[in-house]
Amino acid sequence: MNKQTANLLLTLASIGYPLLWYFGSNRGWAVWLAAAMAVLWALRAVLQQGLQRRIAAALSAFFVCILIFRRPDSLYWYPVWINGMMLAVFGGSLFARQSAIERLARLQTPDLPPSAVVYTRKVTVIWCIFFAANGTTAALLAISGQYGWWALYTGVIAYLLMGILLGGEWLYRKFLLKVET
């Protein structure tokens, strides 16, 4: 399996994860879901390098621990882990020479003007706030046992909010800042 196929499978599994877990939790899907996620993250770890390899290995280990210790209720914590790791990556980039959003922007426009660098840093901060709020919401829903709301939030609402943030930032940049993309 090549890197692109593995990433696509992991992305699709992660997107569908909350609803798969919610609807499968009473059908005995916990072992299968945890095993599938452990394999997909392990595969990603093998195909990546550096920080991405370590993150993928940690997530694979999370699912292996769920299998070893027979704790299917821990499956509710996957979205919290993902948001925590995204917060760490984006937040950590604020202390680096280039923020996460600046690195992404430079893929399209290698020579960013100083004003764009400042702007991308502010957008990175906004994403940090999003990941913190999103992870906290998922954690609170899991802790409170509101599993129906957890599934709705992590499987639908969080993606809608992410889309609104992406789309809103694009509209702001395109029409208010009048920046070409």
Image: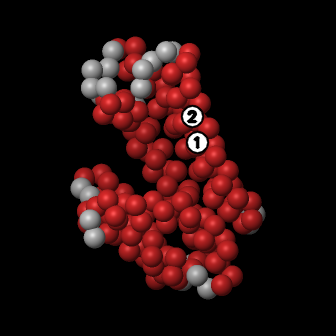
| Side of 73 relative to 144 (left or right) | left
Q: CA distance from mark 2 to mark 1?
A: 6 Å
| Residue 73 image offset from top left, x and y in percent | 62, 74
State which quarter of the image contains the N terminus: bottom left
Quadrant of the image occupied by residue 179: top left
Which residue: 50% across, 50% down? Answer: 84
Numbered mark located on residue 167 in the image: 2
Question: What secondary structure is found at the residue carrying circle 2?
Answer: helix
State the residue at coordinates (45%, 51%): 85
Question: Is residue 19 at least partly visible in the picture?
Answer: yes
Q: How many marks?
A: 2
Mark 1: secondary structure: helix
Q: Residue 21 at x, y = what percent?
A: 61, 72
Left-right relation of 162 to 82: right
Q: Position of residue 55 (x, y in %)?
A: 36, 57
124 and 17: which is toward the camera: 17
- Amino acid type, residue under disc 1 in the picture: Gly
Which image quadrant: the C terminus?
A: top left
Q: Is residue 96 visible?
A: no
Residue 35's place in the image compared with 171, above or below, is below
From the viewer's perspective, is 65 left or right of 76?
A: left
Mark 2: which amino acid? Gly
List the residue tagged with mark 1. Answer: 163
Q: Is residue 63 found left or right of 117 in the rendered image?
A: right
Label 1: few (<14), some (14–19) or many (≥20) C-alpha neighbours in 10 Å:
few
Label for residue 153? none
Residue drawn at point x = 41 percent, y = 33 percent: 101
CB within 8 Å, label 2 to label 1:
yes
> Which residue occupies 56% across, 64% down?
16
Depth order, front residue of 167/14: 167
